[in-house]
Image (tube, grey):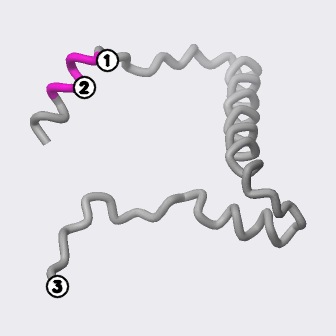
């Protein structure tokens, strides 16, 4: 039995949330993804509010085309 090299050794950062939600009484696993999405949305909204309050410029992430993504995948 051989071992392969792990490309991404970092664990899922949300792996612990299911255990915590279950501990606090939310046992419906189908809602976990919704809660994760809502928490991300609230975090983004709060960051936007702080950015505006402090007068920071808009953040514009770099945009790439599908062709660029395909070329990067072929290189890997």
Q: Which marked residue is nearer to the observer: mark 1 or mark 2?
A: 2
Q: What element carries label 1?
A: loop
Please state if 1 lies on the left or on the right of 64 as rendered: left
Q: Mark 1 points at which residue?
A: 64
- In this figure, which residue is indicated by the disc labeled 2? 69
Q: Give the number of the mark in front: 2 or 3.
A: 3
- Quadrant for the C terminus in the image: top left
Extreme right residue here? 25
Q: Which of 28 and 17 is in front in this view?
A: 28
* Mark 1 closeness class: few <14, some 14–19, many ≥20 residues within 10 Å: few
Does residue 63 lie above or below 33 as drawn?
Answer: above
The residue at the point 68 percent across, 23 percent down is 51
Q: Which residue is drawn at 85% across and 60% down?
A: 26
Residue at x 54% of width, y 58% of height:
13
| Residue 15 figure quarter | bottom right
Residues at marks 1 and 2 touching, judged by CB atoms closer than 8 Å: yes
Q: Nearer the viewer, residue 3 or 43?
A: 3
The residue stretch that appears in magenta = 66-71
| Residue 1 point in image, percent of width and height | 17, 85
Query: To which residue does mark 3 refer?
Result: 1
The tag on residue 43 is none
Q: Which residue is drawn at 18% across and 71% down?
A: 4
């Amino acid at each position: 039995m051989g071992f392969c090299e792990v490309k991404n050794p970092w664990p899922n950062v949300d792996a612990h949330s299911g255990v915590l939600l279950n501990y606090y009484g939310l046992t419906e696993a189908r809602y976990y993804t919704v809660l994760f999405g809502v928490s991300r949305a609230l975090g983004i909204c709060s960051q936007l509010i702080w950015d505006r309050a402090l007068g920071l410029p808009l953040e514009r992430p770099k945009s790439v085309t599908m062709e660029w993504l395909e070329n990067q995948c072929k290189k890997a």
